[in-house]
Amino acid sequence: MTRTADWQALDAAHYLHPFTDHQSLARKGTRVITRAEGVYLWDSEGRRILDGMSGLWCVALGYGRRELAEAAYRQMLELPYYNSFFQCANPPAIELAAKLAELAPPQFKRSFFTSSGSEANDTLVRMVRRYWALRGQPQRQVIISRWNGYHGSTMAGASLGGMKAMHAQGGLPIPGIVHIGQPYWFECGGDLTPEEFGLQAARELEQKILEVGPENVAAFIGEPVQGAGGVIIPPDSYWPEVQRIVDRYGILLASDEVICGFGRTGRWFGCEHYGTRPDFMTLAKAITSGYLPLGALMVSDRVADVLIAEGGEFAHGYTYSGHPAAAAVALANLGIMQREHIIDRVRETLTPYWAKRWAELGDHPLVGEARSLGLFGALELVPRKPSRAFFPERGTVGTRARDLAIGNGLVMRAVWDTLIVAPPLVIREAEIDELIEKARLTLDQLRDALHKDGLI
Ligand code: PXG
């Protein structure tokens, strides 16, 4: 047997993967990724693959940055672990909290550390409710979020998220979490212009607040751009209207920046792109470029001041809150982003080039819409243009496209029949060209295959 076959057999026998149908995986055999450099991965068969998804939206600085490995190594020799409970802290965690305060919008000075985005959102749910209890309004329990939003996989994270397939497993959502529609013009916009639809989608928030009773609503949470839901870029009218509504009813706003944070939109945080003023930001992924697990909940002064002045002990925390090695990697990562002006380059140089090249895919006969923002890209696959109707068996065409893309040496993700990419922020123009070429080749192969099957 080859090494790959050995690994595949062991994998099938012992390894339970996230979001995976194991019978189907065992039939195909798992793809074993063995090394990576820059924007490229290599699998155990030696195939080179352009990573259009930055790992899972996280490897902002690309693979193989020695400084990040060395930061972890040095910190592990100095102090690999100590807890942040019982009046203790460690230097990298303290310095990271200060660094985040420097980078974040001015209302944020404080961070609570976790090891993932899901944990940060669990922390959020408890902190929001604690805040309102301290404010003498303990009935304010309800958190409003969106269908098809993604906020993680823990009980609270999956409840905040609006993935119905997740709710169906494990008795979710937990009490006190309700959902409204998403600002997804391509699917839900009907005859409205995107701007009209954006206002309508935002006003669902107001309707829900009135239905639940404004005195019961604690917070609204959303991703500035929905990532896992299919790179849903809201119309420009959406977020300002949401901000108006949360202000009107005095409701806290949480910006889930797990994907948008640290440069994906061309700003440090997605809320800065849209001009909202959140009370919380959940962070993870690109905070370390994925080199070690780390998440954080940033808490605005108006909330933190109440928790600190009146709250006493917040009975919540994780063994790995403020992990020194993860914090050291985050500091090194953010240091590189600042020193090398990575985010300015995304905004000023890469975004215009990316937008132009990605939009070219929009003239392909299978592409109903090619949208982009910052270094996000999405393609809506449709059988007939200019109709925005999807293929009848939704999801199968997207999966075929994804598999063809891998065959062409490109990682793209399929969300139903939406193909999405989010390449590392350090991608070069020539690598963007390669990505676009491989995507176009994939679309051509898909068209031929669908034609053969009589589906178009
Ligand atoms: N919020 C957002 C916006 C996310 O995208 C989380 C929270 C949870 O983070 P952790 O670190 O607990 O995974 C995420 C995670 C996908 C995919 O298929 C996306 C995520 C995770 C897994 C798969 O696009 N995002």
Image (cartoon, rainbow, N blue to C red):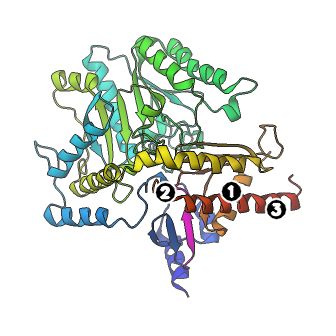
Q: Where is residue 439 in the image (x, y as percent from the top left)?
A: 67, 58
Amino acid on which disc 2 is placed: Ser
Q: Where residue 272 sits in the image (x, y, percent)?
A: 42, 32
The image quarter containing residue 263 is top left
SS at badge 2: helix
Crowd around label 2: few <14 · some 14–19 · many ≥20 (10 Å): many
Quadrant for the N terminus in the image = bottom right
Q: Tell me how far mark 2 sits from mark 1, CA to CA.
A: 19 Å
The residue depicted at 74 percent of the width and 57 percent of the height is: 443
Q: Which residue lies furthest to the left in this view?
A: 87
Q: Which residue lies furthest to the front in this view?
A: 349
Indicate which disc residue 449 carries.
3
Say which amino acid is labelled 1: Thr
Q: Label 2, on which residue? A: 54
Q: Please give the range of residues in magenta.
A: 46-53
Bin the neighbour count of mark 3 within 10 Å (Cα to Cα): few under 14, some 14-19, many 20 and up. Answer: some
Query: Residue 453, percent across and down?
Result: 86, 59
77 to the left or right of 36: left
Instruction: Name the disc covering residue 39, or none.
Output: none
Q: Name the residue under label 1.
A: 399
